[in-house]
Every structure is written in structure tokens, then in C-alpha cells.
Image: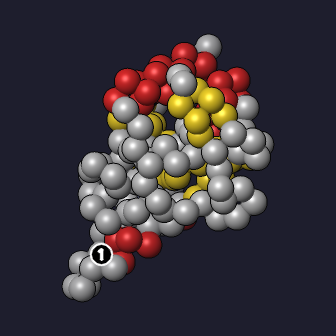
Amino acid sequence: MMTDNCEYCQLAGGYGELIEETPYWMIFLAPSQRYLGTCVVALKKKRANLSEVNDAEWDDFVQIVRKMEDSVNKSFKPNLFNWSCFKNAAFRKDNDDVDPEIHWHFIPRYQETVLFCGVKFDDPDFGHIPQPIARKVSSEVMNNIKLEIKKNLLE
Ligand SMILES: [Zn+2]
């Protein structure tokens, strides 16, 4: 998958660490955890526009939205979820060979500071669009966030 320039996804390459996959989508824990629990939900099939997503893919996505919001509510109790599908970065290239991929940024937002695994997560941009500023946490903390989300996804 090409995610070279998407600032919301990219930190160390790709969409992040795979948490779970469904018949049509893959759920990743995003490399940057500026907003605790940030994930990427990527369509497996290459499609350029949301209007090309078929009914079976949408039905699958609806289940993911429900499960992910439910899971992260149980784990981290955010006040709000941002879902965004930008694809802007694919169009920044100099040539005409743009190659966008459908992937959703799932960004939980927090009014209060959250403590998880001894690490403080705050949301300095609460009430505004999320900022594509990387925040890396240790691989141990990443793994624990992943397990926490996955545990509730599978319930
Ligand atoms: Zn992205």
C-alpha cells in the first residue's frame, strides 16, 4: 500500500500496525498517537473515490464503525470521534500519475487528559481539526493500545 506522504498516517511507514481485518477492510493502529487510539481503516480493494465503494464494502464498514467506537469508548472514554477520508497527499506529486487509496482516519478526541500505561495523553486541539503532528510512544505502549482495542473489538 502506498501511503508515502499522508501526514496523518505516516510516521515510520505505512498505515501502522495491523489490529484486525474484515472481509473488505484492514484496521491499523496509526504510527502517531498524538490522539490516543488513532487508527486507520483501509479498504483492501483499490478504489479512487467513495462513490466506487460497493454495498458489501459499506455494510462491512458500518460494522467496523460501530465496533471501533464501542471498543475505544470502553477503553479510553473519548468525548468525540473524528472520521476523515482525505486522500490529499496522493495529489501532491509532480506528475499526473495520482494514485489515491481509500483509507479512513479514525481519531478519538479528548476533553480531559487520559493516562494509559503510565503515559499521559492530552488533546491540545480538542474542538478543532486534528493536527498532523507525530507523537511516537514506545513499542510496548503501542502494543498495549493495540491489545486494548482488539480485546473490545472481538467482544
Ligand atoms: Zn492517511
Asked where in the image residue 124 lies, by quadrant, the reply is bottom right
Q: Position of residue 141 (x, y in %)?
A: 43, 27
Q: Position of residue 113 (x, y in %)?
A: 69, 39
**Mark 1 Cα within 10 Å, few/some/many (few <14, many 20+)?**
few
Q: Position of residue 73 (x, y in %)?
A: 71, 30
Tell me the element at label 1: loop
The reply to whether residue 57 is in sight is no
The C terminus lies in which quarter of the figure?
A: top right
The residue at 43%/54% (across/down) is 134
Left-right relation of 76 to 153: right
Mark 1, residue position: 98
The residue at 44%/49% (across/down) is 135
Q: Please tell me which residue lies in front, 12 or 103.
A: 12
- Circle 1: residue type: Val
**Depicted 33 relative to depicted 130: above or below:** above
Q: Position of residue 24 (x, y in %)?
A: 44, 39
